[in-house]
Image (spheres, rainbow, N blue to C red):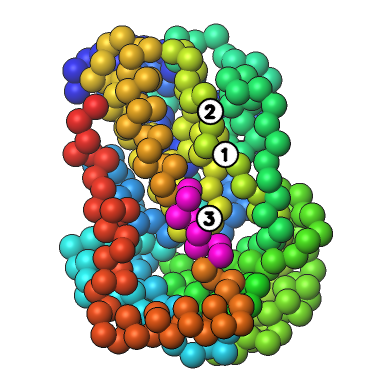
Amino acid sequence: MTGALRDRGVEIVGAGIAGLTAALALARRGARVRVLERAPEIREVGAGLQISPNAMRVLAELGLSGGMARASLRSHAVQLRDASGAPVARLDLVRHRPADEFRLIHRASLIALLTQAAQEAGVRIALDHEVDRLPDAPLVIGADGLRSMVRAVLNGREVPFFTHQTAWRCLIPDRGDARPEAEVFMGPGRHLVSYPLAGGRRNLVAVLERHEWQAEGWAHRDDPGNLRRAFAGFGGRVPDWLAAVNETHVWGLFRHEVARIWQDGRAVLIGDAAHPTLPFMAQGAVMAIEDAWLLAACLDAEPDQPRALARFEALRRPRVTRIVAAANANARNYHLTGLKRRAGHSLLRAASRLAPGRLLGRFDWLYDYDPVAERP
């Protein structure tokens, strides 16, 4: 730490994963941080998150390794299956990346860890605080998500593209003896992802291609019967999981461009406000954590704030653009139909049998990245 942030006033809009991680990282470097959150309490209606080692390196540096170990499960693998439940490919995380931690955690548990750590570091969190204009502070961080007010100030009005996909998200009870791994069931025009969470719960996310529009966001309740009907033909454990669903939320999946303008020397965007992504690489929260760390590191390394913010954007834009593009591609790969589906699954089965390490190795560029080792 250089002391460049000592006593600098920072206001962060949004008390989600991006905002709270940034608050903690900045406060540890001496900044005076206030987080403005429009909700009357910090809570999450979301469900599970997969946290990969590129983000775990940041959380460890912030002193949260112990809390993560208690609140999450270490994921052992990602198992790809066809709609019947038959295995297609297996990415063995423990065997092929034994030194790395992939964690499965409820979003609310991660928010709670970050909130406690931030407050202990001196961060002030102002709840029930609606922000309709840029706060008057030397530095304003827009961590206010998909409908970011700060992004609108910097970029003007933007219209996202509806992907003609909708997703259900829900939690169900779990026996507590399930393998700690993510399972992806892939069918024509739809797929379902499930993994266990600490505390005897299981996360379900089910994505369906359909043309009718659904509002963006996670808070739209839906009839569980609609979910069950959409995946009625799926096999394996899926029928039992769906039978256990008592409450679910549905949302439309929209494709947003990476922000054209990230910063103006005083205000800067991080997380979903800068680069919303489809949920097909499990990197939304991870990118937010990377952003938060590197923003603080850039500001600490360069006393000239406009230059520091420009450096942050230069470091982050290429990487997040690549991740967003990979998520877009995965949306297509999970939903193949006809001959393409049979050929694609056959290739995956052969690769899983003959060269299992290579399948996971395709993502070395993603998981090997160490934000803490980056030199701004």
Query: CA separation, marks 3 and 1?
Result: 11 Å
Amino acid type of disc 3? Asn
Amino acid type of disc 1? Glu
Magenta highlight: main SS: helix
Considering only vertical position in the picture, is 271 above or below 230? Answer: above
Label placed on residue 260: 2
Image spot of residue 263 (x, y percent): 47, 20
Q: Residues within 10 Å of mark 2 (few under 14, many from 20)?
A: few
Image spot of residue 22 (x, y percent): 40, 32
Q: What is the quadrant of residue 247 in the picture?
A: bottom right
Label placed on residue 257: 1
The answer to whether residue 143 shows anywhere in this view is no
In the image, what residue occupies the spot 33% across and 14% down? Answer: 307
Q: Residues within 10 Å of mark 1 (few under 14, many from 20)?
A: some
| Nearer-the-camera pick, 98 or 110 | 98
Secondary structure state at the residue bearing disc 2: loop
In the image, what residue occupies the spot 32% across and 60% down? Answer: 363
Label placed on residue 328: 3
| Nearer-the-camera pick, 101 or 189 | 189
Q: Quadrant of the N terminus?
A: top left
Q: Is residue 217 left or right of residue 89?
A: right
Label placed on residue 96: none
Of the residues under marks 3 and 2, which one precedes in the sequence? 2
Per the rendered image, the range of residues in magenta is 324-332
Query: CA separation, marks 2 and 1?
Result: 8 Å
Image spot of residue 45 (x, y percent): 63, 53
Contact between labelled residues 1 and 2, with CB atoms less than 8 Å apart:
yes
Amino acid type of disc 2? Arg
On whether residue 293 falls in the magenta region, the answer is no
